[in-house]
Image (tube, rainbow, N blue to C red):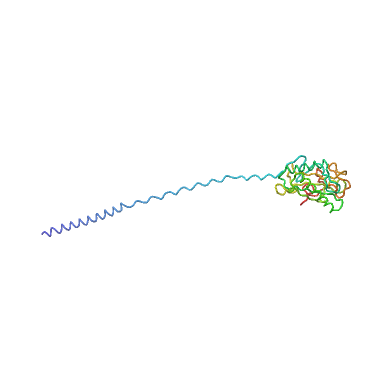
Amino acid sequence: MLRKVLYPVAAVAALGLAFSFNGCSCNADAGMQTAKAPEPPPPPAPPPAPAPAPAPAATQEPPPAAPPHLVSVGKAQLEGDQVKIPGAIEYDVDKATIKATKTNDEILNTLAEFIKQNPSMTKLAIEGYTDNSGKPDHNQTLSQARAESVVKWLTDHGVDKSKLDAHGYGADHPVAANDSAAHKAQNRRTEFHVREINGKQVTAGSDIGGGAGNASANAGGSTGGGDTGAATTTTAGTPAGGTASAAPGGSSKGAPKGAMGGGPKH
């Protein structure tokens, strides 16, 4: 009888215990689901892109260097690359000796002062010419010797010899036809041409004066037969350009290119 009573009670208790375990399990599962780890925070926003570098300031190209210019001194005037001084250098007949005259002193002193006051001029060509009288070899030798005489006079008066070049061209590059005494007098001349400024070659005929350019003095002879309109004196009857004279105006009538304006090519 007691067993009959105890079995049902034990069964009920076991059933209740089973339900109890099942509830705990469900509750545990539910708790586990409820205690789920939180979502990780979103990654931080990327840092802002650096500001673009400011555009470099516009740089202006420096203006081109002004072409070199020389200044006039006294009566020395520039025509292209040639230095001109009124008057005429006079030489002894058929010789390279420069006469001791007031005109010669004035021309050569003016030229020396022009060179000294233009230190940027690093080369000046002294060019001697004759007319077509006499033998070509003699004319060339005479014109070279006269150019060298001018160089010596200048160096004796304080001009740096390294700035000077002497060239004799004889009867080449006439500035007038050798058909009259007056025209031959024009061809017997000494010219002065600027060849370098600051060590850089000057193009023949270049305008380097800016209104005050080159200095060229005419080389005259001794007496008579000269073209007075050109302020040049020559020696009548001298052989092969017995005087070297360059008309102060540097008349280029009938002259080949390079005779008076830019000088012959070197």
Percent x, y for residue 13?
Answer: 18, 56
Front residue of 142/62: it is 142
Q: Is residue 105 above or below residue 8?
A: above
Q: Is residue 88 above or below residue 9?
A: above
Q: Residue furthest left?
A: 1
Q: Residue furthest right?
A: 237
Front residue of 224/95: it is 95
Q: Quadrant of residue 228?
A: top right
The quarter in which the N terminus is drawn is bottom left
Q: Is residue 3 left or right of residue 108?
A: left
Percent x, y for residue 3?
Answer: 12, 60
Q: Is residue 47 left or right of residue 113?
A: left
Q: Residue furthest top?
A: 74
Front residue of 45/32: it is 45
Percent x, y for residue 163?
Answer: 74, 47
Percent x, y for residue 179?
Answer: 87, 48
Q: Is residue 37 left or right of residue 143?
A: left
